Image: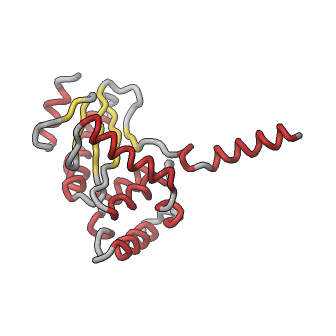
Amino acid sequence: MKKLCLSIFIFCAIAFNSNAETVRITSGKENARITIIAYESLTCSHCSDFHRNVYPKLKKDFIDTGLAKIEFRHFPLDVAAFNAAKIAQCKSDQSLEILESLYLNQQEWIKGSTIEDVNNNLKKYLKNKGFKINFEECINDKLIEDFVLNDRIEGTKNFDVNATPTIIINDKKFEKSLNYKNLKKSLEKLI
């Protein structure tokens, strides 16, 4: 009986452990020939621009066709971006949708003169968009916090990331000006 109770406890601990659900935010087929990693900060206007002007074309031409997959990794540049990244990571079944929404509507939530103001605007924004998130639980989750910080550490260590967005294609840093034309040329060479 003790073994059964212990097994049930361990199962429940794993099932309800947020780290068990902390997975990379990705789009595309897992076995795609090309892997793109995007190091981004949710308060970065250039990252927002990438999601508005580059990512839709990239998705249509390379991701939706199965040629490439993209992994969005966190490189928060400030506390507001750090908190928003933790929110995006918190619900793995909605992470991509939340991430996209935060980038595409950045000016709706990224306002305020203090981090408390920005957090309150972020909470209101998420509620107005219908995302069901326990805000306080998400931004205070130590496992998610470590996951986000480890993305930043690994980006700096492995790819010398020092600005956002930084794009990595098949483990090589994309060094050209980040626009769709340049990105498309680089990707076509890998097909």
Q: Position of residue 129 (x, y in %)?
A: 42, 66
Q: Position of residue 17 (x, y in %)?
A: 60, 49
Above or below, 166 relative to 118: above
Residue extending furthest toward the right = 1
The quarter of the image holding the N terminus is: top right
Which residue is rendered at x = 35% and y = 27% of the image?
32
Which residue is rendered at x = 28% and y = 77% of the image?
113
Which residue is rendered at x = 44% and y = 47% of the image?
147
Residue 6, located in which quarter of the rendered image?
top right
Q: Left or right: where does residue 178 sit relative to residue 72?
A: left
Rendered image coloring scheme: secondary structure
Q: Position of residue 145 (x, y in %)?
A: 45, 53
Q: Position of residue 11 (x, y in %)?
A: 70, 42
Q: Left or right: where does residue 63 sit relative to residue 160?
A: right
Q: Left or right: where does residue 25 sit relative to residue 22?
A: left
Closest to the observer, 100 or 44: 44
Which residue is rendered at x = 64% and y = 44% of the image?
14
Residue 44, located in which quarter of the rendered image?
bottom left
